[in-house]
Image (spheres, grey):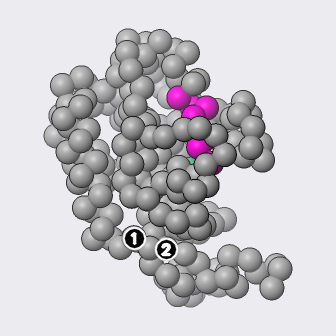
Amino acid sequence: MGRGRAPRDDVAEVLVTGQQLAEVVDRLARRLTADVGDKNPILIGVLTGAFVFMADLIRRLEFPLEADFICARSYGDGTAAGDLVIEMDVGRDIAGRHVVIVDDILDSGQTLGELVRILQERSPASVRTCCLLDKPQARTVEFEADYVGIQIPDRFVVGYGLDLGYHYRNLPFVGVLRPEVYRPAQD
Ligand code: 5GP
Ligand code: MG
């Protein structure tokens, strides 16, 4: 991304508008309220991509909850489980607690699947997963989230927290970059 150029100038196509995102977050908030509104849950946002979604989501939830974050990174090629590294852990014991993992996008399914497995080992009362975006065609492992915001095609997207090289997280919508921005070296 060039210095001084607006991030949105690098976007070829908007897949989910800001208005649609707000509606999706509202719908997810209603479902979470019905399911965990009386459980004083711990919502765990998966850094870094989920921070914008998490911020909007928790402000739609009008019940007692604890908000925390975890930073997990997959170092594998996305085809095998077990290579997830927790780079920053949650700050509290989750034993006996109701946990909702909040993530930006479900792609291969590897990160969220592995994260659920790791958190399950800590004896929580329950673990639910809430994902804003879902690319069902990209799955390499068997995993589905309990709450899915919106399904999108198997394309690389940015915006609303999702980045390319740390850029574009500030776009207020979800979009696809122009090919020359996405793959500058090859073209
Ligand atoms: P997984 O393949 O394990 O389901 O997804 C792991 C992570 O890869 C996601 O949480 C997200 O941070 C990142 N990711 C997957 N697809 C995309 C995408 O289209 N755009 C961006 N910016 N990140 C993605
Ligand atoms: Mg992520």
Q: Amino acid at mark 1?
A: Val
Whether residue 110 appears in magenta in the rendering, the answer is: yes
Q: Residue at x 22, y 48 (%)?
A: 60
Q: Earlier in the sequence, mark 1 or mark 2?
A: 1
Which of the two residues, 94 or 23, is positioned nearer the viewer here?
23
The image position of residue 91, as x and y in percent, is 48, 26
Q: Which residues are magenta?
A: 108-116
Instruction: Confirm whether residue 52 shows in the render.
Output: no
The image position of residue 132, as x and y in percent, is 41, 53
Q: Residue at x 32, y 30 (%)?
A: 66
- The residue carrying mark 2 is 175
Residue farthest to the right? 186
Q: Residue at x 16, y 40 (%)?
A: 62
The image position of residue 142, as x and y in percent, is 59, 38
Q: Residue at x 53, y 82 (%)?
A: 11
Q: Amino acid at mark 2?
A: Gly
Rendered-image quadrant of the C terminus = bottom right
Q: Are marks 1 and 2 in contact (CB under 8 Å)?
A: yes
- The residue carrying mark 1 is 16
